[in-house]
Amino acid sequence: MEEIAEHRGPEHIPSLPRRLAEVAWAFLPLGWIAFGGPQAHIALLQERFVARRRWLDEQRFVELLGLGQGLPGPTSTQMVVAVGTARAGPLGGLLAFLLFLYPAATIMALAGLGVATFLDEGERPLWLDGVQPATVALVAVAAWRLGVAVVNTRLTMGLMLVGAVVTILVRQPWAFPVVLALGGMVTAVALRSQRHDAVDRSGSIPLDNLGISRVAGGLLLVVFIGLLGALILARLALDWPWLQVLESFYRTGSLIFGGGQVVLPMLSAEVVEPGWVTQQQFLDGLALMLALPGPLFSFSAYLGAVAGGVPGLLLAFVGLFLPGVLIIFGVLPFWETVRRYPWVRIALTGVNATAIGLVVGVVFLLWERADPSAGGAVITLAAFGSVMFFRAPAPLVIIGAGVLGWIFGWAGLL
């Protein structure tokens, strides 16, 4: 494999411009076809960069997923940054971040500047009714593939089930880091006799040569914490409208674990209650956002534009995304060293298994929310089989599901 060959010496590592070009080519279409929310985005990342390109192996991908679930910020966007950084350093991470965000963010910003009349209330295109069941299938495929690599004992199977049950029953943002930490503690205690055997067998590109020093990583974490405290204090002391927008969105982005729909109640409280955005404008914008690919955090561009035009959309967008980006860039330089300690690797066994449980639980939640008819079940089975057994590219499956959704909806089967 190319990645194994790259470990032999620096002469086998592609140049930085070539790796940046690879990142650009790989991520350019993602922002246009990443429907279905953060877990569906993670499924796309797994399919493109683990199963196909093999930039990371299953073990490392699940570790990063567990890390992202336990950190504040949008998990899928942090995974995008981590994958781009693993391939081409911080420039690769930033490039992947921008390419992943720009389609939805641009459309939402324009819609906000157009006073949020892009879609009529309650209307949904028929093709989206086909895409939603397909996203459930993609998440199920990702859960299966990642589970095969990680869940291979009774203990890890039990932790996976616990993670799934907590995801289904609790549905609170604090549950993600708590259940992941408990999973790690369980294996750290149960498998403590295996500490001397806990070695790193990952075949993926090491993450200790990212172009981000530990000093830089530490400074980024200090900046994250310092900005949070400074913005809160400044808003208490100063009555500046733009400062209030930036502080509201930055604080929200600093306190959200998992992202996606979790952020909606906080955003509503931050922008509707002060009167920056009306309830009707909020709902209209949300309807449009749910019809678009990309991360739900792009909703911030719309809200900021409605609240304050171009300055508002820039402050809201940067404020909501900046904490998660600072955190993932700040943590990655330390992660490769920390994960090599035997007790950390044993704890990661439980964290990884529990993280798979979170994905499994989301499959059931998405199925419940999709409330599919017989036609939706057919689309789900077709999408699952196409990706799982025939290795069809996920973007083509999503497009095909949209076409089937339009046909089935027109025929009254959805």
Image (cartoon, rainbow, N blue to C red):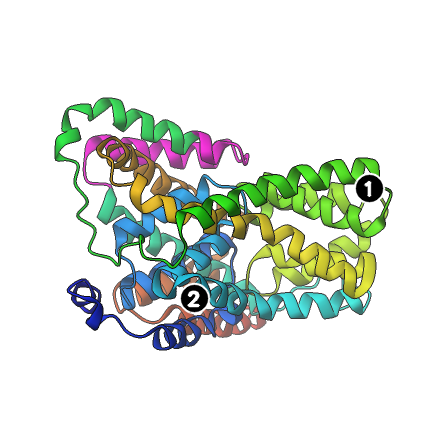
- Foreground disc of the pair 2, 1: 2
Identify the secondary structure beneath mark 1.
Answer: loop
Q: Tell me the residue at 17%/29% (across/down).
A: 195
Identify the secondary structure beneath mark 2.
Answer: helix
Point out residue 145 in the picture as x, y percentages from the top left corner.
27, 53
- Which residue was labeled with disc 2? 92
- Which residue was labeled with disc 1? 273
Asked if residue 227 lies left or right of residue 176, the reply is right
Q: Quadrant of residue 183?
A: top left
Inspect the magenta stretch and tell me whether residue 168 lies in it: yes
Gap in angstroms between the C-alphas marked 2 and 1: 39 Å
**The magenta stretch spans which residues?**
151-178
Q: Tell me the residue at 68%/63% (across/down).
A: 288
Q: Quadrant of residue 197?
A: top left
Q: Tell me the residue at 59%/55% (across/down).
A: 296
278 relative to 344, above or below: below
Point out residue 49 in the picture as x, y percentages from the top left corner.
33, 64
Neighbour tally class for label 1: few under 14, some 14-19, many 20 plus, Cα within 10 Å: few
Residue type pointed to by label 2: Gly
Whether residue 184 appears in this view of the structure is yes
